[in-house]
Image: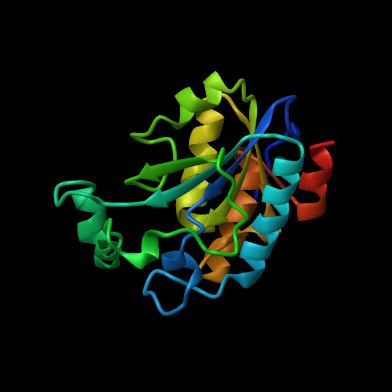
């Protein structure tokens, strides 16, 4: 077996105009009664702190949820993971966790796939707001958080992922993906450090 090699990386932190992307902190993912969910109280609490910090500084906050309005939408994804069929427009599982301090001017974005960028207007909205960097949080680390962070980098944004503000149904997948994100795509930092970056 070849020895492990680590690429040199540079921590970039946040730019001058960051936004917070809260990925799928919805009932279906924060309530263990849902097949898609897990106990995520600590993740929700960390997101509350971040949202409060962004609101206090009048910085943009975007919240995403997955909603399937038609049978043909994201068909391969849904066929692979049948539990996704629960995320219909009339389902309580698509609603944001009630503990989140959502404000009227927060951006709410529906998506069909893992990435918050894929097939949505997210990049256009961020450009309009003058955003140059993203704090990406939410659920799950190995799925929608990772996909959003990787796509964010590919769209040219600096990415910060606060480790306490993301979670997964599988802790091994959570840790492995945080390691990989930090190695190549994002700065994975402690929650307090992320808030301090806001100034």
At a point 30% along the width and 60% down the height, the residue shown is: 87
At a point 65% along the width and 30% down the height, the residue shown is: 133
Q: Which of 1 and 153 is in front in this view?
A: 153
At a point 36% along the width and 66% down the height, the residue shown is: 92
The image's colour scheme reads: rainbow
Position of 45 with respect to 112 (left or right) is right
Report which quarter residue 48 is drawn in: bottom right
**x and y, in percent, of residue 44 in the image:** 62, 63
Q: Which residue is farthest bottom? A: 33
Quarter in which the N terminus is drawn: bottom right
**x and y, in percent, of residue 76 in the image:** 21, 51
Q: Which of 155 and 24 is in front in this view?
A: 24
Question: Where is 30 relative to 199, above or below?
Answer: below
**x and y, in percent, of residue 117 in the image:** 43, 35
* Count of all numbered marks drawn on residues in the image: 0
At a point 14% along the width and 47% down the height, the residue shown is: 72
Q: Which of 7 and 169 is in front in this view?
A: 169
Question: Where is 117 relative to 103, above or below?
Answer: above
Q: Is residue 161 visible?
A: yes
Quarter in which the C terminus is drawn: top right
**x and y, in percent, of residue 176 in the image:** 58, 59
Position of 193 with respect to 185 (left or right) is right
Position of 151 with respect to 61 (left or right) is left
Position of 185 with respect to 112 (left or right) is right
Q: Can residue 3 be seen in this view?
A: no
Q: Which residue is farthest front? A: 104
């Amino acid at each position: 077996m070849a020895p492990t090699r680590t690429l040199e990386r540079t921590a970039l932190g946040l730019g001058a105009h960051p936004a917070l992307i809260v990925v799928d902190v919805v009932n279906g993912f924060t309530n263990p009664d849902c097949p898609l969910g897990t106990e995520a109280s600590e993740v929700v609490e960390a997101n509350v702190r971040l949202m409060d910090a962004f609101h206090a500084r009048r910085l943009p906050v975007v919240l995403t949820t997955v909603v399937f309005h038609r049978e043909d939408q994201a068909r391969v994804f849904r066929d692979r993971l049948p539990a996704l069929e629960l995320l219909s427009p009339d389902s309580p599982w698509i609603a944001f966790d009630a503990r989140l301090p959502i404000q009227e001017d927060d951006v709410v974005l529906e998506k069909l796939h893992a990435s918050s960028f894929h097939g949505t207007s997210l990049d256009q909205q961020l450009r309009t707001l003058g955003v140059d960097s993203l704090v990406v949080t939410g659920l799950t680390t190995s799925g929608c958080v990772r996909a959003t962070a990787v796509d964010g980098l590919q769209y040219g944004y600096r990415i910060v992922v606060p480790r306490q503000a993301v979670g997964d149904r599988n802790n091994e997948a959570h840790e492995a993906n945080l390691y990989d994100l930090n190695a190549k795509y994002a700065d994975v930092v402690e929650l307090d450090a992320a808030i301090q970056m806001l100034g």
